[in-house]
Amino acid sequence: MTNKTARTWGSTLDSVVVYAQGAVCRRLVRGNMPPDARLRVTGLPRSLDPATLRARVLNAPGVRVTEARVEVEAEPLGAGTPDALRRQVVRLREECAAAQGRRERQLGLIEEVRALHPVPPERRRGDPHRRTPVDAWLELAEFVDARLTRLHARLVELEEAQRLAEHELSVAADRLARASTDAPSAHVQTTVSAVLTLDGTAEEEEPQLELELEYAVPGAVWVPAYRLTHRQGDGAGRLLLRASVAQRTGEDWTGVRIALATADLRRRTDLPKLRSLRIGRRQPAPAPSGWREPPAGLADLFTGYEAAGPRPAPAVGPTAGARPADGVGSAPGPVPPPPPPVPVPVSAPPQGYGAPPAALPVPGGADGAVLQGFGAAAPAPAPPARSRAAGRPSGGGGFAAPAPAPMASAPMSPAAPGGAPPPPPPAPPSGPPRPSGAELDYAALVLCGPDEQGGRRGRLFPDSPFDPVAAEHRRRAEVVSALPLPGHAVRPRESAGSFDHRFDAAARADIPSDGTWHTVTVGEIPVGLRTEYLCVPSVEQTAYATLVLSNATDQALLAGPVEVTVDGEFLLTAALPTLAPGGVRRVGLGPAEGIGVTRRTNLHESTAGLRGNTTVLDHRVHVELANRLAGPVTVEVHERVPVTTEPDVRIEERADWRAPEEGAGPEHHAPGTRIWRVELPAGATTALDGGYEIRIPAGKGLVGGNRRS
């Protein structure tokens, strides 16, 4: 039973999980149980990774999927296939080229007319001077001016027509570039299918099976975005989580459930296998490797083929429509057979199913010195040329095990110091051969025919040709990873840190495969919110309005742009930092003109001590705040006290400010920061006084230094 006879089922894209780069798609398939337990599921994208295809049965416990394989079919499209955008671009490109040609021809005519000027005849020796016909000169000048006026007017029309054609071409080309890649190409319709093989029996005779197909595709990225709604005086706000998603996977996501994850799809998540070490004779039985010894007598299988002699070469006649050199149209004479091919020894044939273990190169030896892997016998020397008369190769071949032969002696390497011989080659690994995963895929193995050279005849080898079309689709899909990010946007892999998060959208969404950003609403997140005003009068005597966000949920908020709306009016778009569960961060809203800030300082220098050997720098700080807003506000004033590492230099503070608690506030504070928190009613003013003394011993003072700043 071939795959061509499998029953064809349609599939529906149900959900997509978009990772930091790439996505995992999930399709649902429904239908009756096929009698031959084989079915073909269509609708898969061209850019999918065949190694990630997974399939399982959802509603029939007794039925399972034993094999899932990807197949690609292509067929030419009919003449009536809609391809309006591509045809429009081709038509506009031709119109643009024609408009440019007309403009260039008009420029040529202008240059020709501009070159018209009167040329007097050459005056011969002895001829008298002639009178210049001024009227003819003036008529020619008038003709040239009138002609150039008409030509330039026509040139302006042609340039305007060319500009319009180029504009239409650019618009159409942009629409074609932004169009969905789900549509087929201009001439070929490609169908990607998953061929499934079922096994088992169900309770009913023909049950309605429901299958799930899962596969990974490249070319999908996302970044978070937010919308914050707040009303003044409320202690909470509404934070709407949205996401900007762009995908160019080759299929449109229509009506699918979207989930967003910060994990790296290409990162391996399988756990390492830790094998125990046993001491003693009793050891666990080794796992079967899937490799079997070559069957005996394989060389005799091709005896009749070798006895028949070389295959006759096809007769090469003249090309249709061409005549021989002698003019006679008779058929050419017999073509002499080509010379027998010279056998080329194959040093390391690819490992195949049932093939002998591959030879491993000997480090430090000659090119001809090889080491037989997997604990098998040493390889035989290159087989001699076949004898066509005998009908069999002079040496053994096929699947017969090679006879033990001495290894080719490698030439001595340059003598080491003291004339020591080179180190011996490492011992071959023991145990049976361990073929790769491609060699264990028995359904994909191909039996090599008798025309194969070397040791491939009659043996199974994996047939996995490189698909350049699929590679080109994946390369085009990866273009979305270079899209410019929206303002204040941060890649989720950068803002998530060492943790991975997943966000499930509340409703289904549509995202076409056009490689542009589309906004998807994920859900609403409750956050704690309060308005505070922050000022650092030592740097700038201006108060800034801020929103202090607290995340009381168990889900992190990634960094991204947030649109702030206060009392139903849009205020600004700010950058929201990463907010971990239980974290508190501050979002700036800009300067607040209703809060007045004034700062004055005073410095008094004196000496103290028994002999006046201690310099005392007394700093006084006076800050005045005025609330000109309609409601009460909370103002946080930041000052900074010098920090010293010298034990002899003392700093004594005289103020009611406090030091910030590390890790408790919404931001990180510099050393020596001091904070005042003031509650100001509407229309109230207050004054804050603080200061500190710096006591410097005479031995620690700086001569001519600026120790007052």
Image: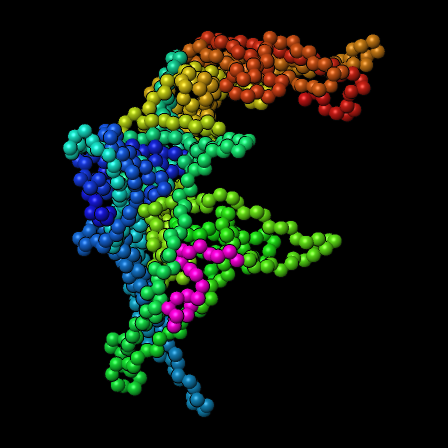
458 shown above or below 213? below
Q: In terms of image quadrants, where is residue 709?
A: top right
Residue 359 lies in magenta, yes or no?
Answer: no
Residue 390 lies in magenta, yes or no?
Answer: yes
Asked if residue 512 can be seen in this view, the reply is no
Asked if residue 576 can be seen in this view, the reply is yes
Instruction: Give left or right: position of 116 versus 38.
Output: right
In magenta, the rendered stretch is: 386-405
State the predominant SS element of the stretch in magenta: loop
Q: What x and y, as percent, mark residue 576?
A: 44, 26
Farthest-out residue, right? 611
Q: Residue at x 31, y 84 (%)?
A: 325
Q: What x and y, as percent, mark residue 168?
A: 28, 51
Instruction: Give left or right: position of 198 versus 612.
Output: left
Q: How many marks?
A: 0
Farthest-out residue, bottom? 126
Q: Residue at x 44, y 89 (%)?
A: 124
